[in-house]
Image: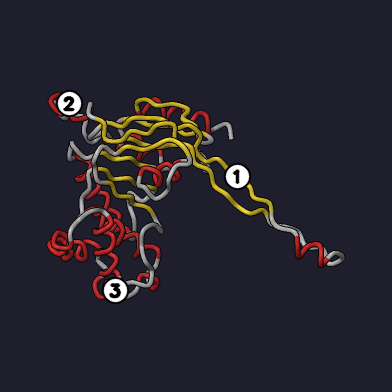
Amino acid sequence: MNLRKNKPDTDTAAANLPAITVHDVHLSYRSIAPVSKRKSLPQQNQKKKGRVEHFEALHGVSLTIGQGEIIGLVGRNGSGKSTLLRVLAGIFEPDKGFVDLHGHTVSLLALGVGFQTQLSGRENIYLSGLLLGFTKQEIDAQIDEIISFSELDKFIEKPVRTYSSGMQSKLGFSITAILKTDIILVDEVLSVGDSHFKKKSFAKMKELISEKTRTVVIVSHNPSTIRTTCEKVVWLHDGDIKMIGEAATVVDLYEEFMSQY
């Protein structure tokens, strides 16, 4: 069941306005291939350098996402889903092409992204909020709600490096959920933490998604999440867009494709 299936026709005007425009985006990763060491040739190996290798994660991706749309990204591991989210969030800069957010604010909810681990949870709330474009006064007004939602209690004053992955997830979700941006990018963390927090976070995400002007892009390997949450789905395959269409249609074809592996 789509979370917005009963929205009135007057809301379709907002969806016709672009929230995200992606044009011909290319992005490559660079790595150094290791050089094997041979004891018989120590001097030669000392001078030998590793080979630079390039992996093109995205090659020529173009799409437009309308304001208020809920879009799912599917694709097998290594297809470029998380890379595309990080390009949309401004964490990665494309080698070629561009992304236009049309003046909208954006936040990325993903594990292990955005925290300075030597700082406390409270300090990271302020840092994250400022990076999202909020003023200190706006963060002051909502920080108690963020801390309460995170359920971190006294740990909020401890360095984030002392947090478990679940605690970091709780903090990241709480910041994104309370400091609301125009565009929310979600990478495999629709429900985080223990069972109680999973229910609470999923209910909060449903609340955020139900706001008809908010644009949401979701990466998930859970077909049920994509089917019930998203209006349209983008299928990425080896850095290219293989298909864009209605959620049920694309997920059916994607699952059929994956069943061959």
Q: Which residue is mark 1?
A: 54
Q: What residue appears at the point 24 percent right and 64 percent down from the top-left corner? A: 126
Q: Residue 163, how many percent across, how many down?
A: 37, 70
Residue lying furthest front: 47
> In the shown orientation, is residue 65 left or right of residue 43?
left
Q: Which amino acid type is shown beneath numbered disc 2?
A: Ala
Q: Residue 71, how many percent across, how many down?
A: 33, 35
Using the rendered view, name the quadrant where residue 47 is placed. bottom right
Q: Residue 153, how many percent across, how many down?
A: 24, 72
Q: Which amino acid type is shown beneath numbered disc 1?
A: His
Query: Of the residues under marks 3 and 1, which one precedes in the sequence?
Result: 1
Q: Is residue 51 above or below residue 6?
A: below
Q: Which amino acid type is shown beneath numbered disc 3?
A: Phe
Q: Could you tell me which secondary element the residue under label 3 belongs to?
A: helix
Q: Residue 58, how many percent across, how many down?
A: 49, 38
Which of the numbered marks, if any, corresponds to residue 155? 3
Q: Name the quadrant of the N terminus.
A: top left
Q: Which residue is mark 2?
A: 13
Of the pair 48 and 197, the residue shown nearer to us: 48
Q: Could you tell me which secondary element the residue under label 1 belongs to?
A: strand
Q: Residues within 10 Å of mark 2 (few under 14, many from 20)?
A: few
